[in-house]
Image (spheres, rainbow, N blue to C red):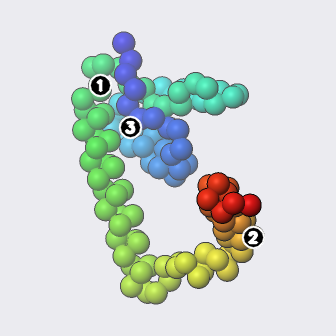
């Protein structure tokens, strides 16, 4: 019987490719399921029960390594002063920020309607 090793829903393509390559490299057999036309099925990488423990150990080590690399990259970007801030996000998406603020103000006014006596 097969077991789900790695859920591929909302996983970046580069991470999924690295996991597939890692499993191929170690000779662990797996098969992949897709989400389907309407995204109702479970996309994932599945392995046989006999390979599950070895694959899980390998995947856990890979994810710790990937997390450490991502954190180091984020620290490096911050140290160089290239990390985007609030002002940068407003400059990149002014329409989105204005719409979000309008929705927030609208919801606050709607909630306060009974107390304002309009």
**Residue density around tag 2, few if under 14, some if 14–19, many if 20 or more, within 10 Å:** few
The earlier-in-sequence mark between 3 and 1 is 3
Spatial CA span between label 1 and label 2: 50 Å
* Residue nearest the observer in this picture, 111 or 16: 111
Residue at figure coordinates x 32%, y 49% from the top left: 62
Quadrant, the N terminus: top left
Image coordinates of residue 30 in percent, x first then y, are 43, 27
Pointer 2: what residue? 95
**Residue density around tag 1, few if under 14, some if 14–19, many if 20 or more, within 10 Å:** some
Marks 1 and 2 in Cβ contact (< 8 Å): no
Spatial CA span between label 3 and label 1: 11 Å
Spatial CA span between label 3 and label 2: 44 Å
Q: Which of marks 1 and 2 is in front?
A: 2
- Asked if residue 47 shows in the view, the reply is yes
Pointer 3: what residue? 23
The earlier-in-sequence mark between 1 and 2 is 1
Q: Nearer the viewer, mark 3 or mark 2?
A: 2
Pointer 1: what residue? 51
Image coordinates of residue 11 in percent, x first then y, are 51, 45
For residue 102, which numbered disc appears in the image?
none
Marks 3 and 1 in Cβ contact (< 8 Å): no
- Asked if residue 112 shows in the view, the reply is no
Residue at figure coordinates x 29%, y 25% from the top left: 51
The earlier-in-sequence mark between 3 and 2 is 3
């Amino acid at each position: 019987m097969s077991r789900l090793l790695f859920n591929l829903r909302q996983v970046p393509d580069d991470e999924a490719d690295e996991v597939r390559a890692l499993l191929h490299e170690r000779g662990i057999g797996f098969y992949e399921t897709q989400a389907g036309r309407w995204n109702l099925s479970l996309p994932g990488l599945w392995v046989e029960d006999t390979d599950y423990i070895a694959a899980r150990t390998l995947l856990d080590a890979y994810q710790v390594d990937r997390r450490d690399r991502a954190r180091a990259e984020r620290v490096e970007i911050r140290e160089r002063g290239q990390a985007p801030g609030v002002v940068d996000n407003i400059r990149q998406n002014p329409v989105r920020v204005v719409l979000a603020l309008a929705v927030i103000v609208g919801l606050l006014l709607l909630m306060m309607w009974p107390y304002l006596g309009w």
